[in-house]
Image: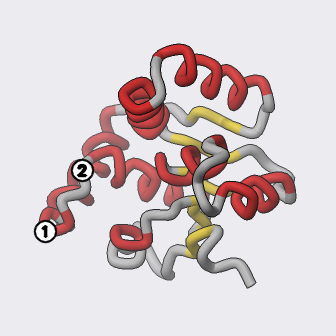
Amino acid sequence: MIIADTSGLLALTHTQEPLHARVKAFVRTLHTPLAVSPMVLAEYDYLLRTHAGHRVAREAISQLLGSRSLEIARLNAEDVQSALNIDIAYADLGSGLTDASPIVLAHRYGTLDLLTLDERHFRVMAPIGDGEFRLFPADLP
């Protein structure tokens, strides 16, 4: 399972993104859907609506859902508290709950793999437990 953050979703769907083709090709090789936090999906929707308009946002989300390449994970109060604890631990990064939520999901799904362009945060923020995140597409050979 690979966890997607907002930048990963934007790179996957925005054809003008320089890494779009690489991200899209990578996602096509996956045998499982991308897991995404509802917080990430809400931020993705907000950014699309703000920069591209409501119609574009609705179409992009509809396309993601229709492709079956996305699994929207549920977050409970304990998950949100974990995300808040991560946000507090990395307060100097100025990230927030949305950036922390993929870390919580990575722990739940037992993965270190993230679809993200956000190396600034995820090279610094540690997984819950041991290891280091593998950031895709940056860590592709």
**Residue 123 spot, x, y in % from top left:** 41, 77
**What sort of colour scheme is used for the picture?**
secondary structure
Q: Label 1 crowding class (10 Å Cα cut-off): few <14, some 14-19, many 20+?
A: few
**Residue 12 spot, x, y in % from top left:** 65, 48
Seen in the picture, residue 42 relative to 20 is either above or below; the reply is above
Q: Mark 1: which secondary structure? A: helix
Quadrant (top left/top right/bottom left/bottom right) for the N terminus: bottom right
Seen in the picture, residue 33 relative to 68 is either above or below; the reply is below
Seen in the picture, residue 22 relative to 83 is either above or below; the reply is below
**Residue 102 spot, x, y in % from top left:** 46, 52
Disc 2 target residue: 96
Front in this rendered view, residue 93 or 50: 50
Residue type at mark 1: give it. Answer: Asp
Residue drawn where x is 53% and y is 58% of the image:
106
Q: Is residue 134 left or right of residue 64?
A: left
Can you tell which mark lies on residue 33? none
Furthest residue to the bottom? 141
Disc 1 target residue: 92
Q: Is residue 22 left or right of residue 56?
A: right
Residue drawn where x is 55% and y is 36% of the image:
73
**Residue 27 spot, x, y in % from top left:** 77, 54
Q: Is residue 131 left or right of residue 35?
A: left
Residue drawn where x is 46% and y is 36% of the image:
44
